[in-house]
Image (cartoon, grey):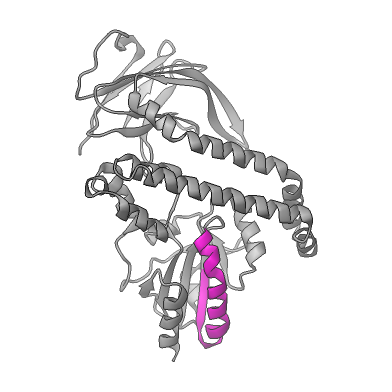
Amino acid sequence: MRMFFLVLLAGMMLTVGACTPKDSFTIQGKITGLSDGTIMELVPGATHKQEKPVVEAIVTKGGFSFTGNVETPRLYHVMVQGMNGVIPVVVENGLQVCIHGKAEKRDYNGQMFVEFSDIKVTGSPVHDEFLQKMDFRTKLDQLYEDKEKKHADINRKIGEARGNKEQVLLDSLSRTEAYAQMEKDEAAFFEKAEAEITKAVLDNKDSWWGPFLMLNLMSWFEEDQKEWFEAFSPEVQKSYYGQIVYKELFPETLEGKNAPSFTVTDSEGKKVTLQELQKNKKYILVDFWASWCAPCRKEIPNLKALYDRFAAKGLGIISISIDKDQKAWEKALSEEQLPWPNFLDDSGISDAYGVKTIPAIFLLDANGKVLSIKLRGETLQKKLEELFQ
């Protein structure tokens, strides 16, 4: 589908009583705190991609306006150019949507962002439905914030010890009652979150909301979530958001091809290439994971057992975390004590490998050819036994 947009300056904005054609939509904004001349952008949301704006508008006399058309309902983010901070709005053709609220520009560690508040979106029944379906997520966010406040002291102590590389202190803190309670509360929270997200998606399996919620609620998919997609009706699977989910869950394979080369930075700031990490290895497992990924953490004991068994025979493992939160990654490393090289993906390695779900384990030979992908558990064990026999 080819989408077109028109930019309307505030002086040309439609009047409140005007009608929007059935084959297009209009978004009119009036946000206090945005100075005239500010460039506003309309950016597609819920695609799991770094999208470019489809249209820009200039704030004039305190207002701005976008007009466009879509085949089916879409989520867009209204943003200030060059700054973080978004106003989500769901639209479909035939709507004249109005956004009112406040904006305040802030500097956070040298990075500018816009804090929007008191936002009211009117004129879009589909947006109202979106807010209803996301209400449980708002409540989960509050629970998470409460949990973090409750355990702020032990988290601070752990962060300081980790930053100072005081392993003895870290080990001591991990044996305290405060740490045990934090772990218990964290496990309970993520269990609750997983259950509620699963319910939200499957309760909407017969409409486009199902795949949309998958994309909007999750940054990454796990292998088990293929079952969610398979529960969708054929029509839902072929929908706009259904196809985005499909391409993430069932990406084109690298199997039989040369693995994309990459360069990572080790803990001492040194640049290391895949070729250097492969040196003197017969086979390499490139393991994409994250601290928050339960199946990934569950696979670690198996990887450790395989490493103990086959490392002397030429097996190497490289773990690459897709964590966005470096502290969460470092905390997981401290807990798991992985004996092989570990890196944080800060240069698009997972994109180069087409990783859309985790855990994702790529088996490479000495020449960098991808022999198998996404093997784990017993199937990975049998494959390595076959190769090293």
Looking at the rendering, in which quadrant would you find the N terminus? top left
Quadrant assignment, res 227: bottom left
Q: Residue at x 44, y 13 (%)?
A: 62
Q: Is 177 above or below relative to 30?
A: below
Q: Is residue 48 visible?
A: no
Give percent across and percent down for residue 93: 24, 26
Count all numbered tags in the image, as a single digit.
Answer: 0
Give percent across and percent down for residue 117: 53, 23
Looking at the rendering, in which quadrant would you find the C terminus? bottom left
Residue 220 in the magenta stretch? The answer is no
Residue 301 in the magenta stretch? The answer is yes
From the viewer's perspective, tell me whether residue 96 is left or right of residue 293.
left
Q: Residue at x 55, y 83 (%)?
A: 311
Give percent across and percent down for residue 30: 43, 15
Q: Residue at x 30, y 55 (%)?
A: 230
Give percent across and percent down for residue 114: 53, 28
Q: Residue at x 28, y 21 (%)?
A: 95
From the viewer's perspective, tell me whether residue 180 is left or right of residue 374.
right
From the viewer's perspective, tell me whether residue 230 is left or right of residue 146.
left
Q: Is 237 above or below relative to 382?
A: above
**Residue nearest the viewer, comparing 18 with 54:** 18
From the viewer's perspective, tell me whether residue 235 is left or right of residue 276.
left
- Region rendered in magenta: 294-318
Dominant secondary structure of the residues highlighted in magenta in the image = helix
Q: Is 339 above or below relative to 313?
A: above
Q: Is residue 138 visible?
A: yes
